[in-house]
Structure formats: structure tokens, C-alpha cells
Amino acid sequence: MKTDRPLLGEAAPARRGIYWLPNAITTAALFAGFFSIVQAMNGRFETAAMAIFVAGILDGLDGRIARWTRTQSAFGAEFDSLSDMVAFGVAPALVVYVWALGDFSAVGQSGERAHWLLGKLGWIGAFLYCACAALRLARFNTQIGIADKRWFTGLPSPAAASLVASLVWALSGHGVSGGDAKWLAWAVTVFAGLSMVSNFRFYSGKDINLRRAVSFQSVVGIVLGMGALALVADTLAELLLAVSVAYGLSGYALALIAARPSRHGGAAGGPPPPPPAG
């Protein structure tokens, strides 16, 4: 009969612990996502959107702190993925549904058969986003160590969440009700969800070296970009919305540039093709 107990003279297997610092930050990100959901249920949509951005900041910290302190672990990677699903998948979907997409159900209750599908569009769009976030995280986990770190395949879930959250934050700050913006909210939610599971490439910025010298043209471009953002954004919410929209469209713009014929007859240079699935 087999037994898991060590034989006489054999050392008992050591119990594996978890590193508290990076996992504490991941737990804080998970709490921020849960807090966002609670605030949306209470009608505090601006606070709910802010909590999603706080979760994004914490999500960017836990991995870096784990690498700096050499406390990376398989447990931490799995925990971080589950936290991301709540903070960047479930929370944005529920926030935008409570704020705007739930208004579609009122159309379905009008009694007209022509509006039957319209009444379901709200929760369909929210679930589509949530499901795409889960698929995006699963694909990311299977491509660790294989994919080019310079590029994300599909829109990252934190960027998709920031796109949805910044829309809610910016419009709520201007007194726009979700019912009045339900079509815009639905289009942005579906766009963010489908972009996460697309094969378009989005720049990750992981190859940026702050110690490396850059060209003068790059500095001028950064200054002009910051100036353009300052012209179109008067508040922090509008600034975050502008940045989120620009990044969300960048993958499609890079694909168009790469597909453009070059002077030599071939395709213009662009991001590398995505790795094969499976």
C-alpha cells in the first residue's frame, strides 16, 4: 500500500511558503477591483472608475517588486492572473453595465417585439467583454516565454479596462448619464473586448531603457505628444481617456502601416507576426 509519509531516515519534504510582499500588493489590486464593483452598485461611478486605475497601478507594481526582490513564484503568477480577471475583467464589465448598458433592458420592457434583442444588448456586451478578458489572460499565460516581450498580442486587459473606466469617469464627471451614452458605452465595451482577443500587436514598452540616450527627434515627438494631450484634455479623466483611446487604436494603426506597400514592392516594416496558436 502506497503512503505519502516519508520512510524512516528520509527527510520530510519542505513546505513551500508564499512571499508576502508581492502577494500583498496583488491582494490590494484584487480589493481595488472588488471595491470598484461595490461603488458602482452604490451609484458612485467616478469612484468606481478610479478604483480600476488604482488596481492598474498596483498590478504594475507587484511584478516589478517580485523581480527586484527575487520573490517570483508560480503561486504569485497564478494569483496575479486571478486578480487581473476580477480587476480588469469583471469590474469594468459590471461598472459599465450598471452605469449605462443596463439601460438597454428598459427598451426590452417596452412590449414591442422589435425591441426584444435591444433589451439584451446591454448584458451581451458586458459579458462579451468579460469573456474576452478571460480568454486574453489565458492566452497570455500560455505564451509566457514564447512571445516577443516587446509586443502584446491583443490589447492588454489593463489597457482595455482603462479604456472603459476612463469613459465612465470622463462622462460622469461632465454630468452625462449612462442612459444617454449607452450606445457609445456599448461600442467602446465591445471594441475593447474584441481587441483583447485579436491578433493585432500592441507595443509593450518593456524594451525601453531609461539609461540609454535617445535622438533629438524622439524628444521633440514626446513633447509634441504631451502638448497635444494637454490641448484635448482639461481634466485627469479626459487625459486618461485620450491616452487609452490612442493606445487602443495604436495596434490597428501599426497593422495598417505594416500592410502598406513599401517603395521596394514589399510590405512596410512593422511588428513581428504573432506566434502560432496552441
Image: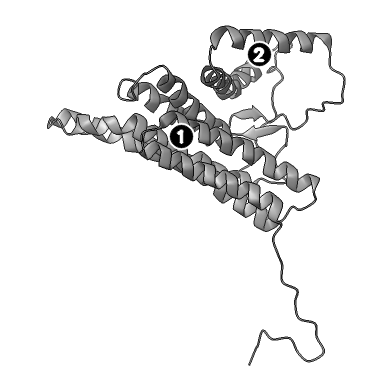
- What separation in Å lies between label 1 and label 2 (alpha carbons)? 45 Å
Residue type at the position of mark 1:
Ala
Query: Looking at the image, which is closer to me, 116 or 222?
Result: 222
For marks 1 and 2, the one nearer the N-term is: 1
Vertical placement of residue 125 versus 185, above or below: below
Q: Which residue is mark 1?
A: 48
Vertical placement of residue 141 versus 165, above or below: below
Query: Looking at the image, which is closer to me, 54 or 146?
Result: 54
| Residue 241 pos. (x, y %) | 52, 21
Which circle, 1 or 2, is nearer the viewer?
1
| Residue 230 pos. (x, y %) | 60, 10
Residue type at the position of mark 2:
Pro
| Residue 256 pos. (x, y %) | 60, 18
Q: Secondary structure at mark 2?
A: loop
The residue sitting at 82% across, 28% down in the picture is: 209
Badge number at residue 261:
2
Vertical placement of residue 254 versus 94, above or below: above
The residue sitting at 58% across, 6% down in the picture is: 231
The answer to whether residue 135 is seen in the rendering is: no
